[in-house]
Image (cartoon, rainbow, N blue to C red):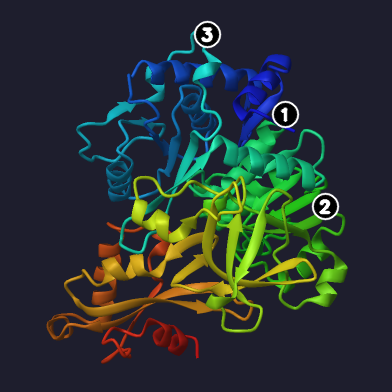
């Protein structure tokens, strides 16, 4: 049982300084490197004289320097906010405004933006000198360890605060309940701004394991991905189901080329039945785990190994059994069918709420009188059967697409600000496995727009405009133009009807 994440990683570094901790496409760094570099970052952050517990933004990709700076932040007593460097500049500014961060660590080059009150620190300004840090200043207990910004309905992202205690609950569960190999090597495919990355990151580092990075820029290029993947050696695969499905296109994605791959761990979206069937054919000796959990509950809170018996028994796979320290109840007042309803999660891995956003926090979190832990209203619909939890979709207008949690209303917010759009709605199109295969924008144009431009020109302008305000994975892949959109009884666009129509 791990009691302190930071101290445990440092203990491993002192005992085994030459053990490889990070492998970035063949470039390796040891635990000794990790301790020295994270200590150096902590020393530099201490010199910035930041306000106590002020969160630090970190801009970059999936490099060793990013991980060292994460640990540097928490050693200096500050939570970190990971922001992928493929994000747009406006998102960085928006996060700073919400978090009131006083510093950003520019692991990758920052875009040219104005943040006059923010100190910028680059890696070349951090010296690897031996420093003695006071562990009493490390993040601990209910202090925030990291903050992940997710999609928000009002056009502004929400910062989910994850404490050291939250993370401990999650990490101890992963290293206890999944029968991991000794000193496991984890695939680190998810960008660090995506909380799925935590399923690889800290379970690897507290077990003297290794992180094998598969950078975002590689996964975005099929040719590069399929040339790189068979060269990587790891025991534990962590990804969304959709990423693994994409890898089916690679003929080397088999046990022959990955003989040590013992575990698949999936989270972030629904795991299709046919995907597990194919995986079992390609990797007959590997264990396949389905997990579930909102970002607000620290990555995941349920797990189940998908065995042959479960495949035979269920067409739509369960999302797991609840971890021992956590309670899940079903609020049937929110369900459409008997015994179904909103999944409500309580336990030590549940976040304290959204950073500097009391209204959203009070709407999604509460403290039950008979529990010492906070509860989170997930917005997910589900039910229990034979001790297993099953997922049935979203109650609100939030979706999961390629593992990313997306508020459709955030897309709508910016879509309707466009000068060409009279009214527009972002709608998911589902495949037969109940997962989102595409996001489309259903739009009624202003009369003036139709007179000036073709639909192809309008689509190009709308997509270009959206790139300034939302993440690339949120931009609709297609625009569908309508003369009218369905209207609800309160006089607003009936979003549910729009979604139903595009899926018929």
Query: Which residue is nearer to you in this view: 182 or 389?
Result: 389
- Say if residue 212 shows up in the picture: no
* Location of mark 1 (residue): 208
x, y percentage for residue 181? 82, 40
x, y percentage for residue 106? 37, 32
Query: Which residue is nearer to you in this view: 383 or 9?
Result: 383
* Location of mark 3 (residue): 132
Instruction: Relative to 139, say whether 498 is above or below.
Output: below
Q: Please give the name of the residue rendered at 41% of the width and 24% of the height, measured from the top-left corner.
A: 123
Across the whole image, how many numbered discs are drawn on residues?
3
- Rounded to the nearest angstrom, the CA distance separating label 1 from label 3 is 23 Å
* Location of mark 2 (residue): 256
Image-based side of 82 in relation to 278, left or right: left
Labels 2 and 1 touching (C-beta < 8 A): no
- Say if residue 193 shows up in the picture: yes
Q: The residue tagged with tag 3: helix, strand or loop?
A: loop
- Rounded to the nearest angstrom, the CA distance separating label 3 from label 2 is 47 Å
Instruction: Relative to 443, say whether 319 is above or below.
Output: above
Q: Looking at the image, is mark 2 or mark 1 earlier in the sequence?
A: 1
Instruction: Mark 3 vs mark 2: give the one in front.
Output: 3
Image-based side of 408 in relation to 278, left or right: left
């Amino acid at each position: 049982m791990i009691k302190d994440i930071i101290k445990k990683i440092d203990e491993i570094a002192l005992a085994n300084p030459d053990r490889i901790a990070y492998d970035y496409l063949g470039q390796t760094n040891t635990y000794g490197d990790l301790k020295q570099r994270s200590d150096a970052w902590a020393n530099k952050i201490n010199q910035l004289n930041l306000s106590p517990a002020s969160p630090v933004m970190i801009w970059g990709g999936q490099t060793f320097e990013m991980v060292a700076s994460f640990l540097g932040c928490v050693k200096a007593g500050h939570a970190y906010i990971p922001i992928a460097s493929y994000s747009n500049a406006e998102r960085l500014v928006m996060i700073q405004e919400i978090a009131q961060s006083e510093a950003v660590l520019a692991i990758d080059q920052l875009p040219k933006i104005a943040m006059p009150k923010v100190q910028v620190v680059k890696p070349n300004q951090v010296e690897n000198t031996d420093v003695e840090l006071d562990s009493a200043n490390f993040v601990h207990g209910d202090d925030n360890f990291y903050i992940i910004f997710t999609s928000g309905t009002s056009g502004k992202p929400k910062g989910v605060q994850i404490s050291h205690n939250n993370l401990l609950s999650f990490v101890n569960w992963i290293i206890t309940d999944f029968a991991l190999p000794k000193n496991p090597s984890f695939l680190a495919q998810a960008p660090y701004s995506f909380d799925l990355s935590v399923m690889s990151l800290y379970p690897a580092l507290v077990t003297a394991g290794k992180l094998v990075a598969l950078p975002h820029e590689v996964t975005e290029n099929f040719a590069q991905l399929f040339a790189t993947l068979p060269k990587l050696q790891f025991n534990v695969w962590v990804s969304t189901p959709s990423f693994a499905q994409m890898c089916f296109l690679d003929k080397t994605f088999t046990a022959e080329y990955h003989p040590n791959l013992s575990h698949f761990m999936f989270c972030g979206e629904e795991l299709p039945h046919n995907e597990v069937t194919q995986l079992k054919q390609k990797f007959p000796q590997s264990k396949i785990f389905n997990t579930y959990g909102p970002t607000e509950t620290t990555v995941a809170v349920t797990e189940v190994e998908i065995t042959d018996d479960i495949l035979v028994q269920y067409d739509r796979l369960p999302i797991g059994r609840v971890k021992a320290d956590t309670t899940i109840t079903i609020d049937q007042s929110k369900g459409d069918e008997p015994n179904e309803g909103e999944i409500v999660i309580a336990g030590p891995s549940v976040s304290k709420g959204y950073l500097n956003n009391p209204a959203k926090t009070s709407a999604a979190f509460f403290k039950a009188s008979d529990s010492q832990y906070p509860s989170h209203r997930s917005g997910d619909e589900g039910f229990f059967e034979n001790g297993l939890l099953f997922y049935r979709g979203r109650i609100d207008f939030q979706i999961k697409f390629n593992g990313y949690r997306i508020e459709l209303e955030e897309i709508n917010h910016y879509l309707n600000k466009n000068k060409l759009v009279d009214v527009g709605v972002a709608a998911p199109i589902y495949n037969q496995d109940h997962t989102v295969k595409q996001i489309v924008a259903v739009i009624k144009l202003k009369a003036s727009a139709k007179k000036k431009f073709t639909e192809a020109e309008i689509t190009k302008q709308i997509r270009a405009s959206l790139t300034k305000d939302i993440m690339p994975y949120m931009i609709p892949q297609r625009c569908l133009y309508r003369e009218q959109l369905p209207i609800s009884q309160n006089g607003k666009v009936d979003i549910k009807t729009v979604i139903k129509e595009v899926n018929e």
